[in-house]
Amino acid sequence: MKVLWEEPVTAGIISESFRYTGGRSDLRVVDIGCGAAEGLRLMLPLVQASSRTLHYTGIDLDVGLLGLAREQFADRPGTSFVEGDMRYDLPEEPADVYFSCGVPYSHLAPDELTRTLANIFRTIRRNRSRSSVVVDVLGRYSLEWEPHWESAHRDYHMSFFNSKKPSSATPMSFWDSQALLACIGEAVQQAGSTFERVTFHDRSIMVGRHTSTRQYNPTLSPYRDLINRLEAGDGAIAARDLMFPSPVRQAPWPISSFHHRFAAQWDGEIARRYSGRQYLSAAGARSLARGLRAIEHRISPGLGVGHSLTAVIGLDHSV
């Protein structure tokens, strides 16, 4: 699931952020909230294909995860990992890409996110660089937590890691693209900067991790588990269990309009593949998984309807 459904989206975001920086032979990346450096693992094939030299700095508060990252990439030149708080400890030196994945910015309250982005934008302006800023947050209108759509700030449990110990609650912020764009605009204003472009990307519309736990939406089908079974060739799944759910909460019109369009394509693909069958063959199950994956990747709108929402911001202060 992670490799086929989620990592291609992240790789596309990385590629976009790299392309914006231009043709420098050296590529300077600051990975904010780097954790165990999952982002670096996905970057390396793209960097190698471009023949650019990567200078990477990962920043995180979790000493344990930083230790894992250092161990994994101990032999890689131009790589360092630093204990630090994204709000206060970002480097002053120029960087081409300020990357993030794993929703680190959702740990910040909206005013903290605005100030943190403003600090990054000031650094870009001061260094007269052309830089991408990748802001990864939790999507407000994910089906995973549809009963809680009215709240943009609430406690969050990372229970999908299946630890035997109960997960502790962490205050988190949830975002749609309009709210995140307003935050970016305020940060730009505070920094006395401008941005040249911004794009938004949804990740895991139907297969977010909490479709497995169903901690926030107990009525939801366990889509992540079911589609994992399809990908493995298990066709002993009833079509009705795969169908798009009907949200009962009110959402802004662009969100509800997208859900209507998405449901038509998703459910249509399922109905076409089953076509009167109770179950699918192994080949049919894999084929359906590919078809559903293509739908999610093709019409993802960047509205905040997935597990995570990512903004890729381009700022050019090089001239």
Image: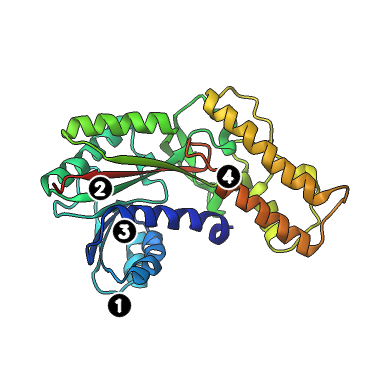
Name the front one of labels 2 and 1: 1
Which residue is under mark 3? 63
Q: Secondary structure at mark 4?
A: helix
Label 1 or label 3, whichever comes before in sequence order: 3
Which residue is under mark 2? 85
Which one is in front, 221 or 282? 282
Which residue is under mark 1? 75
Name the front one of labels 1 and 3: 1
Quadrant location of residue 191?
Answer: top left
Q: Secondary structure at mark 2?
A: loop
Say what amino acid the circle numbered 3 marks.
Val
Badge 2, how many Cα within 10 Å: few under 14, some, many 20+? some
> Which residue of the protein is positioned furthest toward the bottom in this rendering?
75
Label 2 or label 4, whichever comes before in sequence order: 2
Q: Secondary structure at mark 3?
A: helix
Say what amino acid the circle numbered 1 marks.
Asp
Q: Secondary structure at mark 1?
A: loop
Label 3 or label 4, whichever comes before in sequence order: 3
Q: CA distance from mark 1 to mark 3?
A: 19 Å
* Residue at 51 percent of width and 43 percent of height: 307
Say what amino acid the circle numbered 4 marks.
His
Left/right of residue 260 with respect to residue 69 in the rendered view? right
Q: Position of residue 281 (x, y in %)?
A: 82, 61
